[in-house]
Structures are given as C-alpha cells and as structure tokens.
Amino acid sequence: MDVKRLSLLYNEKSLLSLCDVGPGVKRRLKLFRAAQTQRFYQAVTGLWVQIEALRLMSISRYKRASQRNVRFEEVRDLWQDNKIRCLQESLDMLEVYDFIYGFILRKILHPADSYPSWAEQKHGAGRYLRAHVPPRASLHEGWYKFVIDARMCLRPSHIIELFALHKWNTSGSWPVNKTVYLRTTGFYDELKGVYKIEDVGTSPDTLNGVESIEDGIFNRLLSVTNGQFDEKTWKCYREKCWASDARGSVFEWDSPEQKIIRRISDSVKATTEWEASMAPIRVDGFLPAWLSSEAFPAR
C-alpha cells in the first residue's frame, strides 16, 4: 500500500471515491520529499500511540474509580494538552487524522446500510446495537455513531489493511466475518475500565478524536502567543480555510511557529474580507441569476 500516493490522492480536495477512479481520469501527482514522508509517518505513529494508550486504559483493572479517572486524564492530555508536541507536529497529526479516520475509514464503512453487518446479532455482538444505538435512530444516525466508536478502536494499521484488502478483493466482502474482526481489535471491550471500589461518582470522557486534536492545537496557539490567540480565529480557519490552505499540503510547511500563526490569521482575514465583499450581491439570501448554477453549469 503506497501511503504517499493515498496522501496525494487525498490532496485532490474532493470526495471522489478512491475505488471509483476510472482509467481515463488523469491526475498530476507530486511525490513527497523524504522530509515530508518522515513527517507523515511520524504523525501516523504519534496518533497510533495515543489510540493504543486509550485502549490500554479502557481494558485495565483499577482498585478505585478515582485511579481510573486519573489515568484517563493523562491520556486526554496526550490528545489535548501535549506539552512536548510543537505546533507543526500538531497540525501534521490533524491532517493524518482527517485522512485516515475522516476519509479512508468512512469509505471503508460506506454505504450506511452496511454497518449492521459489522455488528450482527450473534456471538454477543448484538449488545453493541442495543447499548449504543438508540432504538429509534435512523440508519444514518446509527452509522454515524458506529463510525465514531470505530475511530476510538481501530488503529491506523487496521484501517490501511482494511482499505487495501477492500480494494483488492473484488470477488466479495472482506473481512468475511466482520464481527470477529472487530472483536480482535477490542471493539467490544469495556470502554471505561473495570474497578473494585467506587469512591467517586464521575466517569472519564473516552471520546478522544478530531475535536481533541483541534483543542490541542488551540492550546498550543495560546501557549505560543501567551494566551493572546482568539479561539474564533482558529475555528474559522479550521472550518473555512483548512481544506484550501492546509489539506494535503501541510507537510510542505517548514516555518517557525510565529510564521504559521500569521498564516492562519492572514487566511482567516482574507476569507472574512471576501465574504464581506460578497454580501452586497446577495438578495434575500440567494445569489443573483448571473452567479447561479445555471449561469455556470458543471462541466
């Protein structure tokens, strides 16, 4: 599996299925340099360690509930308040998470109506559907909940393995027994550890994911700027600027933290100014006819 090529395909900034690209589609691929490849794998490894730590805390036995909570707080700090990781490394990890868990995993588990086959009603796996998916949830709501839980369990190696075999195995579904495969990864294990003495009434938050990484980046921005960075600026960059400015190209950045911060702020400023300039041409919330899809039909 050529991870570099996958990364470059993701750089196409589209949701086109990697499995549906026909031979007539031409792509201009620019290979990673050695330093970019090293950063990519470093981010994958860092993310892998964090997920392994979360799984280890989840299956451990504790004497007291308070001891369990302390261990989960330590794992949370790996995601949200890692003092060792610099800003660039945090951004690299966010891009890797987006690519592996937000893109490839969703492709593997698509379409939504296929997810019950991963938690079929036998060998006790049906407990997942009863315990974690509301009985009146729609198919897409159940699928979304399943994807979130899978992100907390599947390691990067599992996802790349699933994607590779899913693409190569054209004769049928793989793995043949999806429930057994998930069980070997610990998907059905206890999520919050086991303890003997309940000396506190609180439970740890085990849902560390993309929001935790985003919070960690904001904490780093605060640290670098001595608490002067605006949270709205980071959220605006993530929601409106990341896809066009950082996605697929963040591994090419090689700048001091202050320069990265200026890049984030300048991107948000440019986006805000463009949106303000477009506001006067909108009429009752709609674009005028000369900017409609009919005026500029899709090619």
Image (cartoon, grey):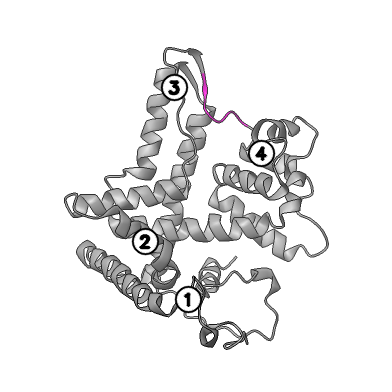
Q: Secondary structure at mark 2?
A: helix
Foreground label between 1 and 4: 1
Q: Is residue 25 magenta?
A: no
**Pointer 3: what residue?**
202
**Pointer 2: what residue?**
236
Residue 42 bears which disc, if any? none
Q: Which residues are magenta?
A: 189-194
Instruction: Indicate the amino acid at tag 1.
Output: Val
Give the CA distance from mark 1 to mark 2: 24 Å
**Pointer 1: what residue?**
283
Q: Residue at x 80, y 33 (%)?
A: 122
Q: Is the C-beta separation of discs 1 and 2 under 8 Å?
A: no
In the displayed structure, would residue 174 be above or below residue 241?
Answer: above
Foreground label between 2 and 4: 2
Give the mark nearer the N terminus: 1 vs 4: 4
- x, y percent for residue 216: 34, 48
Position of 99 with respect to 1 (left or right) is left
Give the CA distance from mark 2 to mark 4: 39 Å
- x, y percent for residue 196: 50, 12
Give the mark nearer the N terminus: 2 vs 4: 4
Q: Is the C-beta separation of discs 3 and 2 under 8 Å?
A: no
Give the mark nearer the N terminus: 4 vs 3: 4
